[in-house]
Amino acid sequence: MTVRSNSIPKIFRKGSKSGVSGRCYGCQGTGMKITTRQIGLGMIQQMQHPDTITGDIVFVLQLKEHPKFKRKFDDLYVEHTLNLTEALCGFQFALTHLDGRQLLIKSNPGEIIKPGQSKAINDEGMPHHQRPFMRGRLYIHFNVEFPDSGIISPEQCQTLETVLPPRASKHLTDMELDDCEETTLHDVNIEDEMRRKKQQQQFQEAYDDEDDEPSMPRVQCAQQ
């Protein structure tokens, strides 16, 4: 809370030894002193004295980050992770709102949620400015967690293929396979890879800078 008071008169003392006007140490000649204090509501009433010229009280609000919800203007954003079964076969869960209410979130029958897909709930965001009875939207961003490798057996894969859409890639013939070079896919963390590439680039640039520096002539010992 910032308390501003303009009751300090402007003071300019002239005639100093240096010839420069001196200023009040409290307000620096502006006539206003700004201080920051934590005060209670009862102290605000005590400050309103009829014989005292009071200044303005300015409240500075700071938005505290929430561990789950993110605010953008009048809308709220939240992330939720589904497993593959929930994304394909349906889901329902309870979401605790900021005011403690439990919102039932569920998918429509036959609806499939894709990774990175978002859904919106009307009137569950923050109140509009100067229109507290109108609220923004609540956006839910869905992440889909896939099972680890090796959990699904080859027999189960064949069963899944009977209910899932057919594969997009065409079946290669033996002649086409003979013309292809076989490769191996490796697991990789793209963030670690980019960090490693950046370190290598910085090291290479530093090494190149050392090579570009002009070499100093060698000093030979004088022969006796």
Image (cartoon, helix red, strand yellow):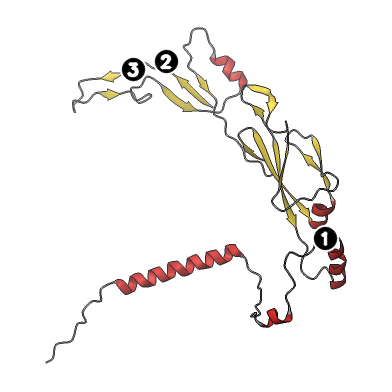
**Which mark's residue is nearer the viewer, 1 or 2?**
1
> Quadrant of residue 48 in the image?
top right
The secondary structure type at the circle numbered 1 is loop
Which amino acid type is marked by label 3?
Lys
Q: Residue 72, image x and y in percent?
A: 61, 37
Task: Please tell me the numbered disc located at residue 7.
Answer: 2
Q: Which residue is mark 1?
A: 164
Lower sequence index among marks 1 and 2 = 2
Q: Residue at x 21, y 82 (%)?
A: 218
Q: Residue 94, image x and y in percent?
A: 81, 42
Determine whether label 3 and label 2 are within 8 Å by CB: no
Mark 1 residue crowding within 10 angstroms, few (<14) / some (14–19) / many (20+): few
Residue that extends furthest to the left in the rendered view of this protein: 224
Which amino acid type is marked by label 1?
Leu
Query: Is residue 186 positioned above or below 7 on the image?
Result: below
Q: Residue at x 86, y 60 (%)?
A: 163
Mark 3 residue crowding within 10 angstroms, few (<14) / some (14–19) / many (20+): some
Along the line of sight, which residue is nearer the eye, 119 or 43?
A: 119
Task: Please tell me the numbered disc located at residue 10.
Answer: 3
Lower sequence index among marks 3 and 1 = 3
Q: Residue 222, image x and y in percent?
A: 14, 87
Query: Is residue 175 positioned above or below 198 on the image?
Result: below
**Which mark's residue is nearer the viewer, 3 or 1?**
1
The secondary structure type at the circle numbered 3 is loop
> Quadrant of residue 88 in the image?
bottom right
Q: Is residue 188 left or right of residue 195?
A: right
